[in-house]
Amino acid sequence: NFISSTKQAWAGFVQDDWKVNKKLTINYGVRYELFSPIGEKFGRQANFDFDKLTLFIPKGKDQNAPLPPNFATDFSNVKVSRGEVGQYLIPWDKTNIAPRIGFAYQAMSNTVVRAGYGIFYGGEENQGGNPNRGEGVPFNQTTTLVRPTNVTTFEPNPFFNANAGVSGGFPVNIFSLNAPVNLRSVAQNFRNPLVHKWNFAIQHEFRGGNSFELAYVGNKQSRQLHFSDPNAPRNDPRPNIEQNIRRQVPNIGSVNYTGTFGFGRYAGLTAKFEKRYAKGLQYLAAYTWGHALATSGTPLSGSAGFGPKDPLNYSAAYSSAAWDIRHNVTGSVLY
């Protein structure tokens, strides 16, 4: 089925500049943003609530779509709720208040000091296809046919002969066979990611329109997207303990879970030398040293390569981020 994801975003802000005196100017303001969760235009996505062990199928014309024939037996401990939630599956996060403040101070005739702080929200980033709740049952299912490990040649009738391959084609009833269901979930307390940002800079102007700026920039990231498996098998010191027994909830397998409990930090030092455009010439040279740390990856990569090393301790994944670039040099000349 075609998945028609949808999202709404609304925002408003007020801002003012206060010129305290001829040397000091203060900027301040506040912004409010309202982002909807990811919805599906026709309600064709479902959410598995791990805490309630319930698969919520939203109200809509397809809310009675049938589940795979093996669902009732293979997931006997999972309840199914139809029509109890809307197309967005979870409540909207309405707490996105974003203040900001900054100042510019002319310390000397050719030297300016600037600083600023603000809170910024992320609510419109794409999350990729992996956490898409529309990719799961009952609206879509992924069926993978694997050749038996002991088969080395392709032979006809693969599904009736354990020693055969796939040259006989796939069965016509493939989508009525038992499905390897992977439950997909988004946290009920999902909150939009936010970043606290701050900076402090000193800029000095030389003759000929040249200027040099030295600045410190930093941020603290909270409520970042984190893709994980809350039902991952726990470590067990006993040998040969079957994987299913080591899960918090047996018999439902892995859960593709999207939450917002990631966090991170960034700190950087920047230096910039610039000549303003005059007499046909302009140039710029800049260098940044910085270090980014995080517990999760990007919204599109999720935790790929940077995910939790311990399913019971997500903080253990705190390390250099996927986007960490220690040294960055840029330059340009326009004549």
Image (cartoon, helix red, strand yellow):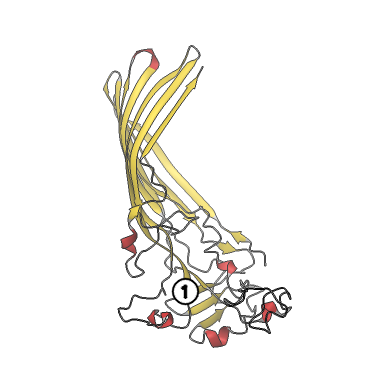
Nearer to me, 7 or 206: 206
For the residue pair 292 and 3, the one nearer the viewer reads as: 292
Query: Relative to 27, is 32 on the left or the right?
Result: right
| Residue under the point 36% across and 27% down | 272
Q: Is residue 202 visible?
A: yes
Residue 155 picture location, percent across and down: 70, 76
Residue at 37 percent of width and 82 percent of height: 240
Nearer the observer, 303 or 1: 303
Relative to 274, 61 lies left or right = right
Decide if residue 220 is in sight here. no
Locate the N terminus by quadrant: bottom right
Give the structural element (helix, strand or loop) at label 1.
Answer: loop
Residue neighbourhood size for the residue with mark 1, other residues' Cα within 10 Å, grouped as few (<14), some (14–19), many (≥20): many
The residue singled out by tag 1 in the image is 254
Quarter of the figure with residue 143:
bottom right
Residue 43: horizontal and vertical position, in percent? 61, 69
In the rendered image of this protein, does residue 62 appear above or below residue 328?
A: below
The image quarter in which residue 247 lies: bottom left
Percent from the top left, x then y, of residue 64? 64, 79
Res. 287 image quadrant:
top left
Question: Which residue is most to the left?
Answer: 107
Q: Is residue 111 above or below residue 253?
A: above
Residue with the most extreme front position = 152
Tell whether 239 sits left or right of 257: left
Asked whether, in this view, residue 313 is left or right of residue 43, the answer is left
Give the mark count.
1
What's under tag 1, amino acid-wise? Answer: Ser
What's the residue at 41%, 39% (across, down)? 15
